[in-house]
Amino acid sequence: MMKKSIVRKLFLSITLLLIIFLIIVFVGQSVFMQSFYTNKKVNIVSQELTKFAMAYKAGKYNNTQFQQELSKLYSKYNTTLAVLDKRGVLKAENNFDLTVRTDAGKKVYVPLNNLLYSDQIDSILRLNIKENSSITIRGFVQDDYFIPLYIKTNMGVWEEENQPTNPIQLSTKNSIQEMVNVEIKGKVVTLHLPIANQYTYSAQMNSLMGAITDWTKSDEDFSGHTENDYPLIYRYFDKANGLENKVFIYPINTHKGSKEVIFAITSLQPVDEAMYVLKDFYIYAFIVALLLIVIISFYYSKLITKPLIKMNAVTNQLAKLNFNEKIDIESEDEIGQLSKSINSLSENLASTIDNLQQANHKLMQDIEKEKQLEEIRKEFISGVSHELKTPLSIVQSYAEGLKDGLNIEKNGYYADVILEEVDRMNGLVVDMLELSKLQSGTYTLKSEPFLIVDCIENVIIRLFENSSNDNPYKFDYNLDEETLVIGEKRKIEQVIINILSNAIHYGNPGSVIKINLLNEGEYVKISIFNEGNHIPADKIDKIWDRFYRIDESRNRQNGGTGLGLAIVKTILDLHHSTIKAHNKEDGVEFTFNLKIYSNYV
């Protein structure tokens, strides 16, 4: 039944297992993909930043190599890196700065590198700052270092959009000197402008500067941290573009002894976008994967169970003793070995059962033969007892008469009767011995080719050679003188003698006995007909039994020993021939066949 099918069970098991695995994969990706990606990227960037910091700290980079490393980090890891001095000023390949001589005659240095990659650099350049031009600057000042928040020239005004309440300070809290928010006026003494198209607006650099500003507003500093703690990592959300970022901070002491800080920022936007797309992708992927799971599960369940089903079918046939089915699996694995074992078992069982059947058949034949022999023995004893009882009684009676001398004149008659009965008993014993020898199963025919016509004529001559010339019977021949048969001639003569004697004994006196030969291909059919009374239909099949006479009274004067036809049938059985008796219109016909000796020349 289907509900018990191993194919169905295996199909459901594989399908369920793969679906569970698929759900685990999809759920795992949905839940852990983002955090895994973030952690993996953070670890990679941290390692790259550490290698960069160690090389930069040792002074292994010139300006060109420095820029190449920055480009490499950005292109390969989507990471923007910046190096700031202790005052928080961005270090650049070509500085953007100016020096102002105040009205009081004091020179003040104004760095503008932090604006190089911002969206405000164009606003600064539109002020058309030139040497010896008048300028007003407002911002934080420390010693001769000025961090501008407001610049005014004859061409216009620039003002920091998000003015911090404190300037960027990257020194440890204990080393910070107080910075004052002031305004200065004066003339531009020196001016370094950025090279055209070298510095353009970078959203990620802008985010980095925003992250630096955000970090300085916190209470975090570098005190309490060791070299092994770097880089410091924190999450930064840029409100301007709505992106999540990871910021890396690595303070160093350069080979020149100056204190600098390496800042790096990497965007988490790619994984966010990927996760957003994956949510829709998972729906289609799950459907496709589910279909593939069903197909693969069905295929493998069929592939795995096909040999098992075949073995089950073959073993069911073995249980029904049908050993013709074989398993045609040639694989070298355990299933293949099991198939070979079942095939070998089938062959051994078939051979064993065949031997047992043959032995059983032989045993049944032996038992049946034993039963037949026992039946023959019983019939023999019964028949012999009956057949010998009467003559022995006669012999006994006449012998007693001779002994007592009751009638001396009849002594000769008594002696003749005794001799006649002894002769009859002698014939009976001879016939019984002959029949016993033929039915013993050990008798071997001495077959030879002979002319059946000569055999029949010899029998007729022997039967009537001692008779008078006025023979009351007539013979009608229809014989082929060239018909050569194979068999034991002496036994076939005995068959013909018994049949003719039977025909003479039971036929009408003076009637015609017809003997015919009919060629039937491989065999010749011999028929002997005599006129006379019919054999009753219910007795015609019993005439071949021992001691059977048609006359139920078994009158000894109506027949011979009662073994003649039994001997005839036994002889013809040994010749693989059959004999039959048929009631004809005016008599009885006996027919039997003999194999023609076709090689006779």
Image (tube, rainbow, N blue to C red):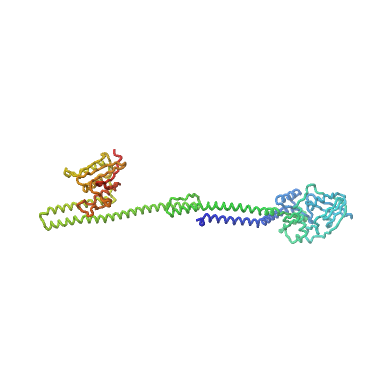
**Near-viewer residue (215 or 412):** 412
Whether residue 269 is visible:
yes
Left or right? Give the position of 192 relative to 359: right
Number of numbered discs overlaid on the protein picture: 0
Return the residue nearer the eye: 44 or 440: 440
Rendering coords of residue 499 (x, y %): 24, 47
Where does the image place residue 280, in percent across and percent down from the top left? 66, 53
Q: Hey, which residue is sitting farthest top in the picture?
A: 601
Is residue 439 visible in this depiction of the protein?
no
Direction from residue 114 to residue 77 in the image, left or right: left
Q: Which quarter of the image is occupied by the C terminus?
A: top left
Check the image and name the residue furthest to the front.
585
At 55% from the left and 52% from the top, the residue drawn is: 298
Residue 217, image x and y in percent?
78, 59
Please, which residue is most extreme toward the right here? 104
Quadrant of residue 275 within the rendered picture: bottom right
Q: Nearer the viewer, residue 576 or 552?
A: 552
* Residue 237, percent from left and from top: 74, 57
Q: From the viewer's perspective, tell me whether residue 292 is left or right of residue 364.
A: right
Judge by depth and name the residue closer to the eye, 445 or 394. 394
Give the residue at x 56% y 55%.
14
Q: Quadrant of residue 453?
A: top left
